[in-house]
Image (spheres, rainbow, N blue to C red):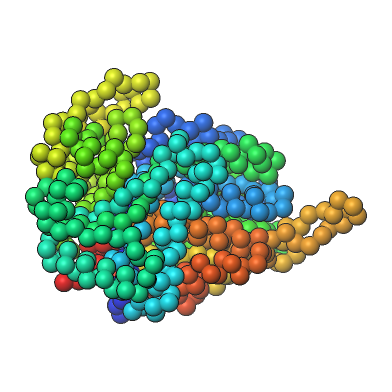
Amino acid sequence: MGNCVSRPQQPFPVSRSSSAEKYLRSGIPDGLPIAEPTISFWTIPVAPIAKAHSEENLPSHADVVIIGSGISGASFARTLLECGDSLRVVMLEAQDVCSGATGRNGGHIFPATYHDYEDLKKRVGEDMAKKMMRFRKAHLDEILAIAAEEGITKYTQCRAVEGVDVYFDKPTFKEAQRKLRVYQRDMGEHADSYACYEGLDAQEKFHLSPLAVGCIATRAGAIHPYRFVTSILSRLLTDYPKEFEIYTRAPCTSIDEPTSSCPFYTLTTARGVITTPHVVHLTNAYAPALLPALKGVIFPIRETMTAQRPGRNLHASTLHGGRSFVFFDSPRKGFDYLTQLSEGEHELMFGAGFESRTDSGTNGMYGVHSAAHVGGAMPIYFGAESWGAEALPVTPTDEGVGLWAEGRVKAIWSGLLSESADGMPWVGKVHADVAGRKAPPVSSTPSTLNSNTEKLKSDVTAAPGEWIAAGYSGEGMVHAWLSSKAVALMLLGEDLTEVKTWLPEPFSVTEHRVKMAKRTFKPDVVLSGKRGVFNL
């Protein structure tokens, strides 16, 4: 989940009827967030704000309503509150704070670069493909800087690591090397951190199985995503007690357009009704529940994650959390991803690629096949000698007593990531023709009083409307933060000259793009993700 899918392909003309609709009948719900039946290892111990305002009724009005409390919500709220002018902001969360994809992912900050670049270049042109690569790569330094500014670097285990793509199939590795050469040729200094290792050199350097045929290594990152998000939101609640509130267990079930008697959006939730001139959709896979036009454009895919105790010899491979891995078999058999905590039992956070549609039910449980795979794959990837004897559990603390298993697989859970039908995130204003409802009048734009004259001064936001950052295709950690920051600056009506230098234009939300995405949607390609990146 933390870094999984997002391998854009060329558009394929397919029948509109059908591909999206058939997928949406595949068993994974696309409605409101469910109460997940599995416990994510990241979320224990529970953050003090996890159930914020879980019983109180909502206020009647807010200047901005944010739906979603993951990494997108944290980025948006931080930018809005620190750059805005005394706005009243309410964040709605259907379950607990950071209980969705961010709190259930792999903790990777490991952008797909050379894997995607050549295909993107064909689709959007060389300059835009380069811009997309720079955008992804910028997230590592951005998140490292944010953690330092917030004073949470150690607590969140936010760090740069060596990221290693490991290949077990020779034709796939050769194709990866070719793609890397194309990427390095075009990207120049932005691609100088890559190194290739073949055969025995790769096996010895990274202490891998003799089955490994080669590796490509570069700079990447890792983080405790739940602590990162909940720490930022906790600080914002403290610093902006009059401006910012979070309401959990408050799923938004409908959004009504303004009327002659109410010039705002009206949001109905399980905890009451709230009006606002601005609605911000930061629910990723769940966005289509409130924006029906995006059904078949953004859709959910369930993946399996685990926390596992490392074999006693594995420190030479993982460097106690100093390395992250993505393991590729053949193009048709998928990939797995691994990072390691830098404290505690140095748990291995190991996840599989997509659940197959036949391996995943509607109740939120992980699939049996996927769970069995992740439970036994690592000694094969690293080899028996590099893995070593199984680790024994340490004496448990009060945290998680009774929750975790005592064997290799300490915890197993699943979660929903989103996939975008055209492989790119959806970022920006959602115009009325896409939202399916009219926006509030300009006269509803939030304004503030002039302290000297007590008269209304100029508007403090852009014109009212709906906004979104979603559809990260499993690459949320290298798209969400800056995408949501950009949306916040758009909503504030800021000069976007600087933002336009780094935010890719194809991410914008238009009716034409929605129509094209539905028309060119091909489930077998989209679902393949990284599996389909090397077309041999």
Quadrant (top left/top right/bottom left/bottom right) for the C terminus: bottom left
Q: Residue at x 41, y 71 (%)?
A: 130
Residue 369 visible to the viewer: no
Give x and y (percent) for residue 414: 31, 44
Question: Is 326 displayed left or right of 515 in the figure?
Answer: left
Give x and y (percent) for residue 519: 36, 76
Q: Residue at x 70, y 66 (%)?
A: 441
Q: Residue 31 occupies which quadrant of the picture?
A: bottom left
Q: Residue at x 75, y 64 (%)?
A: 443
Residue 314 visible to the viewer: yes
| Camera-side residue of 190 and 513 | 190
Q: Residue at x 13, y 31 (%)?
A: 389
Question: Is 84 displayed left or right of 317 in the figure?
Answer: right
| Camera-side residue of 145 and 20 | 145
How many marks the image carries: the answer is 0
Q: Residue 396 occupies which quadrant of the picture?
A: top left
Give x and y (percent) for residue 27: 29, 55
